[in-house]
Amino acid sequence: MPYNKRIVPSANQLTRLRVVLVAPRNPLNIGAVARAMSNFGFQALRLVNPYTPSFREARSAVGASDILAGAEQYKTVAEAVADCTLVVGTTAVRNRDLQHPVRRPEYGARQIHKRLGSGNVALLFGSEKFGLSNDALSHCHWLIRIPTGDGNISMNLGQAVAVCLYELIRDSRYARAAGQSKTATAEELERITALLLEALQTSGFLDRRRVTDSDERIRRLVRRLHLPERDAVIWLGMLRQMLWKMNEGRKPGA
């Protein structure tokens, strides 16, 4: 296909992608991310607990001041991805014991295209020094890893964002029709996670199986269900009814 004939995502799809930077500290990297977004036509930048002086300095990034001016700040990853039906993290892997499927950028881009047809997608990038924490990763459905040489596996933040965004605009042949059934948002999945954890605590299940990262494990489990929006409503109703019954049974005289 000739380069000038290449199909790219629609303007509507571009607006549905959220680039989320978690705890960024380097103003040059933040500016480079905004510039890459501007290059490839993406606008929605979100930052979770950015280093305030660096964020102020980054706002002067050449060619991307509008993106930085419109960037939204959040205190938690959960808040930053609440309106998204798919959350994809990025990782260099290293020696981490990951609990998620890890995909190459070109394959991951195809899956993201499919979801952009009907809902918002968050693409998460961690801090320059530590990457995404285990807690941040627990909000992800799966991960992207950019193949690199063994001598230096960690890419600059701005470069990593540019590679991922390029793959997204490179070819949209795999995009689904916009009329497909909607998927549950991250906010709905987080409500299910909270209710399920409460039910497990109330039932005594967590007392019998004590683990330090139970919240993260349950959050990952819920996301592996890939719940449609209509099913999320049913799950929420079921869990609320179960909790009500359990709490009624614990009342004196019940």
Image (cartoon, grey):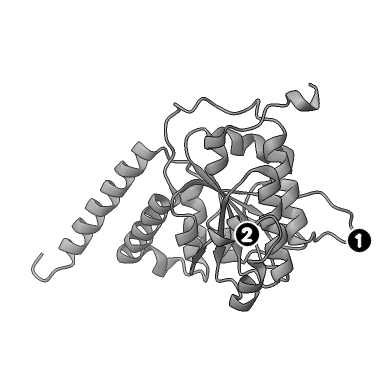
Q: From the viewer's side, name the closer residue of 26 and 64.
A: 64
The residue sitting at the bottom extreme is 53
Question: Residue 231 appears at what percent x and percent y?
Answer: 36, 39
Determine the residue positioned at 37% across, 60% down: 194
Picture disc at residue 114 = none
Q: How many numbered discs sit on the rendered protein?
A: 2
Q: From the viewer's side, name the closer residue of 141 and 71.
A: 71
How much space separates mark 1 and mark 2, taking CA atoms?
A: 35 Å
Tell me whether circle 1 and circle 2 mark residues in contact (CB < 8 Å): no
Is residue 152 visible to us here? yes
Mark 1: secondary structure: loop
Q: Is residue 165 above or below residue 124?
A: above
Q: Is residue 187 above or below residue 95?
A: above
Determine the residue positioned at 59% across, 56% down: 66
Question: Residue 44 appears at what percent x and percent y?
Answer: 55, 51
Q: Amino acid at mark 2?
A: Ser
Q: Amino acid at mark 1?
A: Gly
Left or right: 218, with 134 as reference point? left
Residue holding disc 1: 151
Is residue 20 visible to us here? no
Q: In terms of sequence position, does the residue under pointer 1 or pointer 2 come before the other? A: 2
Determine the residue positioned at 30% across, 42% down: 234
Quadrant in which the N terminus is drawn: top right
Residue holding disc 2: 65
